[in-house]
Amino acid sequence: MSTVAVEVVYRGIFQKTLARNIVRTIVFAARKEGKIGTAFGRYGDSPERNGIPAKQFAIVSDSPEELEENLAVYEAREVDVTINVDDTMCKGIESWAWYGLQPINALTKPGGTLIVTSRQTADALIEDIHQKDSAYNLAIVPASTSFSGLWVYKDDHTDVRILGALARVCPELVRLDSMLAALEDQGWGGLKLTSARNTHDRLATRPVEPGEGSEDEPFSFDLPGWKSMEEGLVIKGVEGGTGFRGGSLGEGYDPIKSNASGDTSYEPTRNAVFKKFSTRSMRPVINFDTCIKCTLCWLQCPDTCFDVTPDGLYDANMEACCGCAVCEAVCPVADCITMVNESEFNDNNSQWEHWTKDKDSYHKWMSELIQVQKEKDATRSHGYHSPGTYEAESEAEVALTGDDD
Amino acid sequence: MATQTLYETEREELISGSEAIAIACAMADVDVITAYPIRPYDTVMQYVSKLKADGAFDCDFIVAESEHSQFEIVKHASAVGARTFCGSSGVGWFYAFEAITVTAGLRLPVVAMVGNRALDDPGAFGVEHNDAMAVRDLGWMLYWVGTAQEALDTALLAWRVAEDPRVFLPAAISCDGSFLTHSQAIVNVPTQEQVDRFLPQYDRGRLLLHPDNPITVAPQVNEDWLMEIRRQTDDAMRRTSDVIREAYEEFKQVFGRGDDSPFIEEYMTDDADIVLVGMGTLAMPVRVAVRRMREQGKKVGFLRVKFFRPFATEEIQEALSHCKAVGVIDRDYSYGSPSYGGVLFNEVRSALYDLDDRPLVQSFVAGLGGREVLVRDVEEMTQMVQDSIDSGKVKQVNTWIGVRE
């Protein structure tokens, strides 16, 4: 094989340095085998925005001519290995660089490998990952989501473990000895080398068959041609005056009846061509019964994601939520807003609607999620942190992984 | 000096075109660098400030409050004998335009990097050549870089030529946004000794603004002075060709690399029936396409214009005089221009007018706003040029490539 391409899918800010370390080391390691390569970020991604899915690539070829076929492009057309360093993005990614949801394995070649850092099982991940027509492999590096970003670099060995795993699943890209030599060149010795070697030796890979995985159709948008676009850069806005969820708030409006009759016209709307479903790694779960209607979440949410419901409650709109957890932090009620890991959810439906329709069912759902989150609390890596959380998590993480033997 | 310990030996680095220029700034021991952030140019200021913070580079690094001030500061610094560097992108570059125009008029050898970016509106980050192109009539030398290596080399060449007393004109180095500014490639970084051998100190001589040399710069004039001043600048620009040729020969001797010509790169043009012409990283997909078409027995070549100002009329005439047809690919546009073609197209067509046996010339506008120009696009353009050859004339002079209808 003359050209090998690798992509790293990461969360903006939080994991930017991690992604950069991985792709650069790939090129350095391949150079040791006489190959030539390039490393670049997906331009237009805007990885300076908290949590936004973003990509970096490493492309390695035997000769400059072969490499040239992959230059002056934004993304490799297909990749031998996709590396996903935040398992909540197994649901797909929507960066700033394009419209619509790109399945996490969209660029993974037939027979290629998807490496995910995760504490979930392969089956749980595959449930979230969109199915493909072709077979590929799933390799899990057991780890919590690494917080190795632009401002804070948590040196939890995720970079070297990924690179060790890569040498295992794609030896035609670079052999383990070259990889280890490249790591040493960057001043990473001792435990980090051990971590790389251990992950290489212990990596478990599971084949994923064609058609296996989520059947969800990734949301997409049609881009208009120049003849059909409005002139003067004018974009039609959301019509005003239709009230909550588009439905009239006038006399006799009954959201439950309206829903039962199949009237979906009252769905609240945001940007028609950019959803933030994949931007967050957590989302707020709201206890509507304890809400005191103080308005703080609605006021403080930096993404104005809270819709005011006809009964004066606040429903977090999943089209707009980035998972920053400011709402949880400002809420004065102890158990009203709880941030829960995104991988626990299978849809983006309105919580208020669920609660309105069936309060018992909602409470059961909510309690289970909060319980799961409490058990997983050590794995919470992104979003708003109160002082001391980071240190506590770091200690918990070391206790949890204990990989440095 | 700290720089000497960093650059004692020639070595390979994995860096972007922007990093390459930042390293060139350090090696050229630039005295004054001004900055104001705008993507994609801002990558240069990031790397300059990193070099400075690391103690590898000692310069006055001034982050101005706007692009206008940014270019004003280097203009003045250059007048008092400081070697200078600055840069911008897109509308940022345009905001500085008053300062940019006077810099050439005052014959100040400022070197600027333009990270090519589409002009607003709409706000977009991708490469388009119209931003840098705007200085084409103002007495700036203007160069389009093709690789990160060439970015480093051209920066060194730029100071050498601009600061030559026979020239004393500013130089702009254009780097395609994303494909050069944000993509890391293997670059040979020369030694400080090589750079010192190639690049003499900037000596402003009798034009130095200094208390020991009482002079006035830039008085107000009337129509009785202006034409003579313009004619002087014209003569300086006419002298650049020889100075560039001389400097480039020495560059090749000192650094051991370089093309045949400093002005153009010819790729498989010798026996070509069709020669495609373009600038910047367009060369990457075009060279790949040319290789593929050659394998199919098609006689296709490529000419990359490096110096847009001075425009190498004679060399370009010579390179294109033997082919049947020329296809010029512009990453720019000129609304309402002759034949509604690209800027480079009209320059090339004009240059070929004096040939006794002129090839057909066809215009393509492609890759605006950073849209990828793919190998198949190049093949499609080549086929259109072939159709013109077959029918004996160019039926449609300009074609937009890759635009959604």
Image (spheres, rainbow, N blue to C red):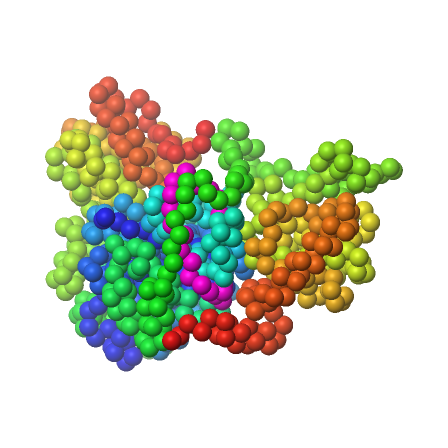
- Residue A133 is one of the magenta-drawn residues: yes
Location of the C terminus of chain B (image quadrant): top left
Residue B50, percent from left and from top: 39, 71
Does residue A348 appear anywhere in the picture?
yes
Tell me where residue A392 sits by quadrant.
bottom right
Height in image: B263 above or below B200?
A: above
Query: In the image shown, does B187 or B311 lie closer to the viewer?
Result: B187
Residue B166, percent from left and from top: 22, 60
Query: In the image shown, does A368 or A36 lie closer to the viewer?
Result: A368
Outermost residue on the top side: it is B391
Span highlighted in magenta in the image: A129-147
Does residue B140 appear anywhere in the picture?
no
Height in image: B6 above or below A208?
A: below
Main SS, magenta region, reads loop
Query: In the image shown, does A356 or B217 lie closer to the viewer?
Result: A356
Image side of residue A127 versus residue A29, left or right: right
- Residue B224 is one of the magenta-drawn residues: no
